[in-house]
Each structure stands twice: as structure tokens, then as C-alpha cells.
Image (spheres, rainbow, N blue to C red):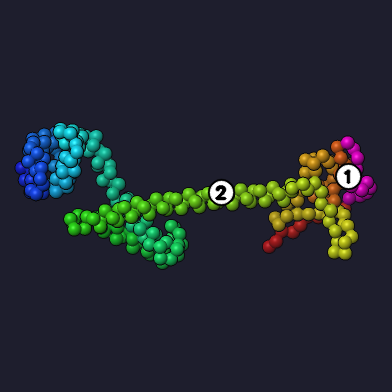
Amino acid sequence: MKTVEEYARAVRQALADHPDRDELLEDLDDHLAEIAAESGLPLEERLGPPIAYAAELAAAYGGRPEGSRRVWDRIRASERFAAVLGFMRQLKPGWWVLRGYALAMLLQVMLFGSGVVPSNPGEFLTAAVGVAVSLWIGLRRPVPLLVPLVVALNVLGAVAVFAGAVQAQQWKDQAQRLRMQESDLVRQVSVGDEVYNIKPYAKDGSPLKDVYLYDQDGKPITVNPEDFGYQVDRSCGEPVLNRYPLPLVSQDGEAATAPTVCDAQSPVATPSKPE
């Protein structure tokens, strides 16, 4: 844990070659002392490593009005900022896991055209290796030479996560479209487009009667003649609505099919469901 003097000395060394070094470090000691007094946490925990703080000073100085650095330091020294920063640090392990998984699956997509979810032992193993490597990188102390590589991995990981979210939304939309298509198909089978009666014929072309129709699940296939201005003739009692052809009459009472001859109805056939 560095003292205020040691931290300030390290910052000065990091900015030794900066053209505006004197202006950047004009009140550095006062700022650091004020931050250290406001909180009992070490400066490295509040402001980061001296080299990182020096880089932030240089970036904040360019194009900013005088005194902006003091405002930013006060923000960073506040308790709320410390709480948010602490919460973000707690999320790091979760991000390391997500980053490794996303990069591993991105590699799988690019090389083998697989999906964003593992579907075989090889893909599960690749995802596990990606997570392990990502955790190993995250748990290591930062090495200056590897910082650009880590930043690049974070950017690629974010892109992979975004691409995975887009792919998941596409899968959801596709599944919804398939459900709608299946719903439309069921509607067409049960009601039909301009179908209000079914007239079955034998192989030799002779008309059949008393034909019971069921779908692949054993459910009766029915139509709605009422939607087309017809109704089922019930003069001989309640008919079986999936026995074709239906005896229909128009709404004005005229017969739409051959006149109904009342006779004993044959027993209703119940289809056997496939094994």
C-alpha cells in the first residue's frame, strides 16, 4: 500500500515526458491528500494504479476547462462512486465467465458454423476451455504489455454477446412465426377456405355417404357451413358433424344437398390412434 507521497511520486514518473507535465501536476499533492483524508481506503483502491491515474489525468486535461480534474477527483472520492465501483468489481467474475463462453462459441460459429448454444461434447469442451482461459486472464495481475490484448478480448467478447442476443431474438421470432403458421394450418383444416361440405368418392368415382373423417390425432374434422349461408339439416335429429356429406339446407330453407332420408344412423366410428 503506497503512501500519498509514494503514489504522487509514481504519478510524476509516469508523466515525466508529458509536454504539459507542470500544469497536470500543479496541485497533485493537495488532491491526493484530500482524497486520502475523505476515505480510509488506499489510494490505489480508490484511484487505481498510479500509471492508470496518470493516463486519466493526461486524457482529462486535453480540451477540458481548468478545474475539471478537481471535480472528477471529487466524484471519484465520493462514497456513491465507491459503492458503484465496488459493485462493478463484484461483477467482474461473471463477466469473465460470459466473455470466455461468448468467445468460445464465436470461434465455433466461425470455424464450424455451429450455433451459440453447445450441442455436442466437443462444443461443451470448447466452451469450458474458453471460460477457464478467460478466468485465468482475469485473475492474473495486469501486465502492461498484455493490456491491449485484454482490451481486444473484452471488445470481442462484447460483440459476441451482442451477436448471441441477436441470434436468440431471431430464433424467438422464427419460433413464433412457425407457431402462427401451424395455427393457420389448423384453422384451414378445421374450417377451410370456402369449404362448407365434403363429398367423398370411391376409387371408381361413385359417391360415398356416411364417411367419418378424423385428423392424424383422431379428432373429428368439421366445417362451418353457417359461415357460408348454410346450416345442417336437423329434421331427422342431431347429426354427426364429421360424417360426410353433411345434409345441408340454405338459411331460407332450400335443400343444398340431396333431400335427407331419415333412417337409423350407423354407429359412430371411433378411429384407433397410432401406436
Q: Earlier in the sequence, mark 1 or mark 2?
A: 2
**Residue at the disc numbered 2:** 176
Question: Which stretch did the figure color magenta?
Answer: 252-265
Dot 1: element: loop
Asked if residue 16 lies left or right of residue 156, the reply is left
Q: Residue 106: percent from the left, percent from the top?
A: 39, 59
Residue shown at 9% from the left, 39% from the top: 23
Residue shown at 7% from the left, 37% from the top: 26
Q: Residue 170: percent from the left, percent from the top?
A: 49, 51
User: Circle 2: is it few (<14), some (14-19), or many (20+) Cα within 10 Å?
Assistant: few
Determine the image quadrant of residue 71: top left
Q: Amino acid at mark 1?
A: Ala
Determine the image quadrant of residue 255: top right
Q: Amino acid at mark 2?
A: Gln
User: Does the segment drawn in magenta span residue 225?
Assistant: no
Asked if residue 20 lies left or right of residue 254, the reply is left
Q: Residue 112: percent from the left, percent from the top?
A: 43, 66
Residue 256: numbered disc: 1
Query: Vertically, is 38 above or below 264?
Result: above
Residue shown at 92% from the left, 46% from the top: 260
Query: Vertically, is 130 above or below 198?
Result: below
Dot 2: element: helix
User: Does the segment drawn in magenta span residue 254?
Assistant: yes
